[in-house]
Image (cartoon, grey):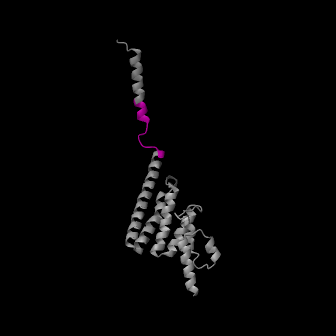
Amino acid sequence: MKRLSFPFVLLGAFAVTACQQTAFTSSSPTVAVIDRANEMQNVLNFDACLNNGLEQDAQATANDEPGQYLASAETLSGCDSKLRDSASLVDIRQRMQAKALAVQNYIKGGDIQAARLALADFEASFDGADLIYADGSSFTDTMHLLLHRFDDRVGYKLASLNARRKAKDEVRRAWYWQTN
């Protein structure tokens, strides 16, 4: 009878245990991996929605077509819902800009009630955070001026808003022609 040397026995034992370990390990992905894949899919869905809404906005701008502005606004309004519980994975500024553009496009499309609802959704979604235009004016103040304060004819309230100057001038002009 032949005797096996110790290193060969040890190597054989490792080989057998290695086979047994792989036999007991599951080959299916873990729950964390599946959750991460779902989160990344949600982000991809948001990105695709945003790109679609921006393309519609570009077409609406090129054609100056109210219906296209409304289609873009509808698309952009729904993008945030595609994130589900993955909102923290997308830059908040990007999400804010998508919702802000939706508000503006509802106005350009002529659906003031939808614009008011979209503005309320914007404010609720971002806890009072605001976007600032290049001229230093506030997005929310400008939208409130256009959507809610047009009939509130108190000049000092208008002056205290950090709204776009052109929007304030238009409101003042409209007030003037309503009384003269």
Which x, y percent locates residue 2? 35, 12
Residue at figure coordinates x 39%, y 14% from the top left: 5
Q: How many marks?
A: 0
Residue at figure coordinates x 55%, y 71% from the top left: 165
Which residue of the protein is positioned furthest toward the left in this rendering?
A: 1
Q: Is residue 20 above or below residue 152?
A: above
What is the magenta range? 19-32
**Along the line of sight, the residue nearer the viewer: 3 or 138:** 138
Left-right relation of 38 to 158: left
Q: Is residue 13 above or below residue 174?
A: above
**Residue 6: quadrant of the picture:** top left
Q: Is residue 62 above or below residue 23?
A: below
Which x, y percent locates residue 49? 42, 61
Q: Quadrant of the C terminus?
A: bottom right
Q: Is residue 176 magenta?
A: no
Q: Is residue 20 magenta?
A: yes
**Residue 145: quadrant of the picture:** bottom right
Q: Quadrant of the N terminus?
A: top left
Which x, y percent locates residue 8? 38, 18
